[in-house]
Amino acid sequence: MTEKARVAIVKGERPLRQADIEDMVARAVELVGGLSGRIRAGDHVVIKPNLFAPYPPPISVDRRVIAAMVKLARQAGAGRVTVIEGVSVGTLMKRVNPERCGSVAQRGFGSIEVMKMLGVKRAVEEAGGEVLGVEDAQKVEVAIEGGKALHRVNYPKVVLEADCFINLPAMKTHTMTMVTLSLKNLQGLLDEKGRYFSHRDDLDQHMVDISKIRMPDLTVLDGLIAMEGMGAGEGGSPVDMGIIMASPDSVALDCIASMCMGIENPLVVGTTRIANHEGLGCGNPFLIEVLGNRIDEVKKKFTLPVNYTQPIDTLVTGVYPNIDLYIGGACPTCWLMTAMAEAMLAKIPQRFSLIVGVDPKVPPRLRTGLDHCFFLGECALATTGELRDLRNEMQLGGLDRFLGGCPPYEQLLVKLENILVDMGYLSEDELVEKALEHRKKFFDYYRSRDDTWEPQ
Ligand code: SF4
């Protein structure tokens, strides 16, 4: 009989202090075989947490879990422990940075900046490790053996050369992959371009391909405070789970973690299904041994992103009275980005035209002026015939309302916000206020769970 994959679940009782968290991490790791066979004296251990944005849990992994893992690795004999992370594309290019704002809203946070602000850098260094931002890491071009959507990427050399590689994801829902757990977390190791361009409709396959470069030797999941709803950023809401999970099999961990999130069939998660199919791990819960707490002892029914619970067109077409949408053949990513653009435009008491996808049918006369007409995505921009005439007319009028990209991702939202500021519908102050509101919401929540934390 083949050996079952093993996944540990350890539930703690609040309040959870540093020592409790260290015990939980140590117990979860021990349940799946401990570190003695994985780390030898003098080894270089590399840990990849999920530090998605400049917000504490549930948006980013708890600094105390990272520190606990660094400490454990050191106790197991590691000579050097490096904690490496590349923050999300939205954090690098879109999130307004109130610290740097003068009269104009400044955007973007680097990975080390986020690590400092969250107290991760200090916690890691006090535990005997060092931090490294993916932006600063030496990269090598890697050809991915067996890659289906990704074939070549620039990848941090330090991960390739690590004696032991530990993945440290958060437990969150995600609007593009349903959930983000172990497999999705590895995306943060790609360089900025790689992270940006993997956000396509084959994102799940991209995530699976990344894991083929270097499978983690161990995955430890921070499920102390998880996230539900429109994650993985500010749109999501915290769920008090109070668990740590561990497994040498990332796919098995994702399978069991998604069941703990109330997803009855874990194979509806694309990354788990594809990785299981490609033999990268076990996605079949009947072939996984769960150690420690049982799933039913910790399970909560997470609210999934709304685009996973109802057809995407019900969020996009016929929804907003002030938006005339002309959508042709479009991929799910373009539908999702249209939903996001519409959510922004719906708040403005003006009529807008939005043109999306391949060959959308646009009437001879729009109901808006050309200055209130936006093209979204490369397909709409490449459509010829009357649409080309329309674009030419806009260009002759000096109007750049072209929100390009395939997929049209974070840069679409940045450009749209900038245009709305130029048009006088949004102010720089409102952008900063919105960033401060988000900050307050997540900072206050986390401080109610960890009163030792202060942003730095
Ligand atoms: S621009 Fe076209 S190909 Fe690209 S995501 Fe949109 S609809 Fe799909």
Image (spheres, grey):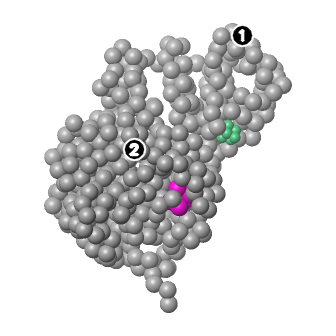
Residue 256 shows up from this direction: no
- Relative side of 222 to 184, left or right: left
Write the residue at 50% across / 90% down: 1
Q: Is residue 210 magenta?
A: yes
Q: Position of residue 215 (x, y in %)?
A: 46, 63
Residue 193 among those drawn in magenta: no
Viewer-nearest residue: 347 or 215 = 215
Horizontally, residue 208 falls left or right of residue 93, namely: right
Residue type at mark 1: give it: Leu
Q: Circle 2 sits on which residue?
A: 137
Q: Quadrant of residue 220?
A: bottom left
Q: Is residue 78 left or right of residue 174?
A: left
The quadrant holding residue 168 is bottom left
Q: Residue furthest bottom?
A: 1
Q: Main secondary structure of the magenta part?
A: helix
Residue 453: x percent and y percent?
19, 44
Q: Secondary structure at mark 2?
A: loop
Residue stretch rendered in magenta on the structure: 207-212
- The kind of residue on which mark 2 rests is Ala
Mark 1: which secondary structure? helix
Q: Quadrant of ligand 1?
A: top right
> Mark 1 and mark 2 in contact (Cβ < 8 Å)?
no
Residue at the spot of label 1: 396
